Image: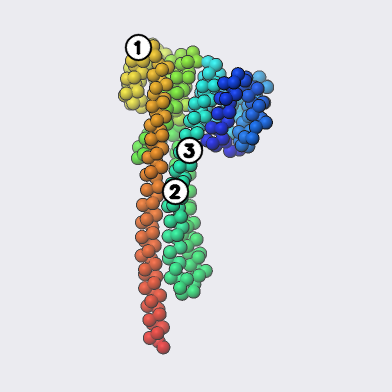
Amino acid sequence: MRFEAKDKAQLYHELTKLLQAGFSMEKSLETLDHHPLSDGSLHVVRSVAQHLREGTSIRDAFQNIDDIALTGVEENLIEAGERGGLLEDVFRHLADYYERVHEARRAVIRSLVYPAVLLHVAAFLPALPKLVRGDGASALWSSLGLLAIFYVIAACVIAGYLFLQRQSTTSTGIDRFLSKIPILGKLRRMLAMERFAEVCRIYLLSAFKPSEAVAAAGRASQSGHLREQSASVSQDLASGQAMGPALLARRAFPRDFAAGMSTAEESGTLDQELQRWANLYASRVRESFAQVEVWLPKAVFLIIGLFVAWQIVQVYFGYLNVYDQLMEDLAGH
């Protein structure tokens, strides 16, 4: 069952409106069951409603949805929101987060349309000399085979990246490797820090201990490196150490963020400081998505441009062969 970013943004937005209007969670789900939602969203609504009727908590109801696995940021935020009575804030944040993810993906796909068209045109360029000689079938199969090779390579690259992305949520080494990729690495770091700041804020507002808040935020960040470092910080906080020095001692956390948390802890404004940083990282995520939208098509276009140049050379030599063959035929007559 598919439950993509667009579906999540819509569902969490609808839940925010209903909870804001004073509906209970059960009543909100009952209302949404009769609304024109996607199949994935309706499946989530009905599954969560069924679990709630069986007496489970809201967090467990979302976690135990059949055929759909939620992300760590969703599970941890919903748990904290339920405990602290902040579900409305949690769903509002999730709706905004997944709306931005959905829009960014659409923008990147749109920007790749022209390079994709150019690739398909280039794949059929070498077929032109063969068409002149009347060997159309051979030319067609050759071009289709070339496209198939590109599709296989692209599928392997995408599948490989997605596999590493999944592994990076728990593996420090893979996470740090992916974070070094130009542009994409920065985007991953900003997303991880946005998740960390928002989840940590909600947990603190929900009366969790700072050690619990930091540990949960690390798990929700979906970054293996942050997860590992957050667990160490959590242990330091549980033993009585202040948050600022504990964060500053870990390289996974930006120094300006750690310094801001240090002064906020002393002034008693941790939740406000975390909100500021969550907003700041959200802004940086939008900037990083914009950079990906610009540079990813350029990188693809460069690769395809080199391929087109090679194909043009192939076409040139193909026409030379046709010309030589014509000259030989004329000389023979």
Tell me which amino acid carries mark 3: Glu
Q: Position of residue 211 (x, y in %)?
A: 43, 16
Q: Residue at x 48, y 64 (%)?
A: 142
The image shows residue 22, relative to residue 169, as above or below, that is above
Tell me which amino acid carries mark 2: Leu
The residue indicated by pointer 2 is 112
Q: Is residue 98 visible?
A: yes
Q: Residue at x 32, y 23 (%)?
A: 256
Q: Residue at x 38, y 31 (%)?
A: 284
Tell me which amino acid carries mark 1: Glu
Q: CA distance from mark 3 to mark 1?
A: 39 Å
Label total for image? 3
Per the image, label 3 sits on a secondary structure element best described as: helix
Per the image, label 2 sits on a secondary structure element best described as: loop
Name the image quarter holding residue 285: top left
Q: CA distance from mark 2 to mark 3?
A: 15 Å
The residue indicated by pointer 3 is 103
